[in-house]
Image (spheres, rainbow, N blue to C red):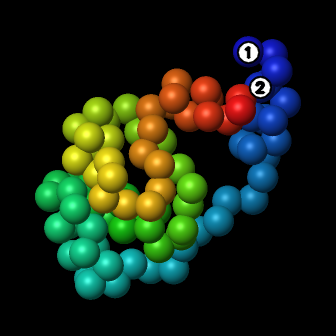
Amino acid sequence: MILLQIPFLDFLASQSIITQKLTPKEIKSAYKIINSEDAPILAGAIKAKVDFLITLDKKFQEIAKNKVKLKILSPGKFLEEYRK
């Protein structure tokens, strides 16, 4: 765990990247993938072209898996990926 402490603190201290405002079309497109109130979150992640979306919501992970280019992972799985 100590091996991740410094990179994690660096990550927290880094400047956040905020995407532009989402359009209704972008949200509607994400809603077709995940038919829930989480559609704007998915739309924002897609628009920002992120590599990972981290969530504890297992339903979100299962529904969107293999439907988007980004990896949707739990925090634990993300840390496993980050260690590699």
Look at 33% across and 52% down and name the residue there: 66
Q: For the residue marked with disc 1, what is the amino acid?
A: Met
Above or below, comparing residue 16 to residue 24 in the picture: above
**Residue 54 as seen in the image, left or right of residue 10:** left
Which residue is the extreme one toward the top? 1
| Label 2: how many Cα within 10 Å (few below 14, some 14–19, many 20+) | few
Q: Which residue is mark 2?
A: 4
The crowding category of the residue bearing disc 1, from other C-alpha atoms within 10 Å (few below 14, some 14 to 19, many at least 20), is few
> What residue type is disc 2 on?
Leu
Horizontal arrangement in the rendering, residue 66 relative to residue 63 (left or right): right
User: Where on the picture, by quarter, is residue 32?
Assistant: bottom left
In depth, the one of 53 and 17 nearer the eye is 53
Residue at 47% x, 73% y: name it. Answer: 47
Q: Taking 34 as reference, is 28 above or below it?
A: below
The label on residue 1 is 1
Q: Verify CB contact (< 8 Å) between mark 2 and mark 1.
A: yes
- The residue positioned 31% from the left and 35% from the top of the image is 57
Q: Quadrant of residue 16?
A: bottom right
**Secondary structure under badge 1?**
loop
Q: Is residue 51 left or right of residue 13?
A: left
Quadrant location of residue 39?
bottom left
